[in-house]
Amino acid sequence: MRVLAIGDIHGCRGPLDDLLAWVKPAAEDVLIFLGDYVDRGPDSRGVLNRLLELRQSHHVICLRGNHEIMMVEARLRGGAELKMWLSVGGGQTLGSYGSAPGLTGTLDDVPPEHWQLLQYELANYYENDSFIFVHATVWPLLPLSEQPEDRLFWEFLPAAMRHQSGKIVICGHTSQKSGMPKIVPGAVCIDTYAHGGGWLTCLEVHTGRYWQVDLLGRRREDQLLYER
């Protein structure tokens, strides 16, 4: 059984499909998505559809990212929340819900199963015996059940992030425009800027092997070493 973490997708359905076809997750593997499925890239609708499909056949854990939070708040509150979401990629998300190419959709065009996933079925974090998985960061001195939301969803990767549990933290959120995973003491960030000319990354956490695909369909792979 492999434990496979996938970084911030941001509407990049093509690289996601290419990455899954290459890695070939088996039914017994655990697939952990680190959040930020929507916004900025061209096909947020397609990404959410793919996640829903995968949950029917694989062991899938979907974490909540700050962009999912903003999209839900835009629907619930409108006004300033809607304006803010549109300014950080929500416009591209609505574009993927248009009824025809070139037409922009509205929040009313987002199907109920997508809202169900975004609002109710995402996890704030996940952990196993050796690793913690979170969208953004953790506060090292607090157990996961007491983590503040600003840490889980909004804070950027610090110079070190050694959690009191001794577990390695696998996170996204802090975009690595180099396209390479960022290794700091206690943690690895695998948001490798998929939507902005970087790569979408899948990390097998026990071995450190990772696979990457970009919007042009290029592939590369390597292995990382954790810094404890």
Image (spheres, helix red, strand yellow):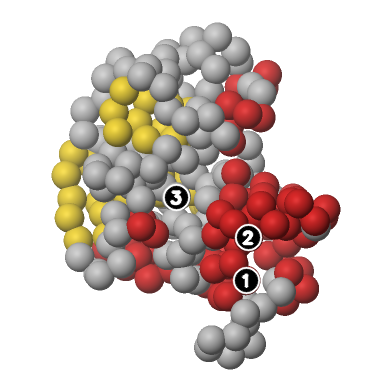
| Precedes in sequence: disc 3 or disc 2 | 3
Q: Do residues under tags 1 and 3 come within 8 Å of each other at their CB atoms?
A: no
Q: Is residue 99 left or right of residue 128?
A: right
Instruction: Tell me the quarter of the image containing the C terminus.
Output: top left
Q: Residue 94 carries which label?
A: 1
In the foreground, 82 or 207:
82
Q: Write down the quadrant of residue 222 in the picture.
A: top left
- Disc 3 to disc 2: CB gap under 8 Å: no
Residue behind mark 2: 86
Circle 1 residues within 10 Å: few <14, some 14–19, many ≥20:
many
Q: What's the residue type where badge 1 is placed?
A: Leu
Disc 3 element: loop
Q: Distance between the residues labelled 1 and 2?
A: 9 Å
Q: Is mark 1 on a helix, strand or loop?
A: helix
What residue is at 27 percent from the left and 20 percent from the top? 227
Q: Which of marks 1 and 3 is in front?
A: 1
Image x and y of residue 150, in percent: 63, 29
> What separation in Å lies between label 3 and label 2 (alpha carbons)?
18 Å
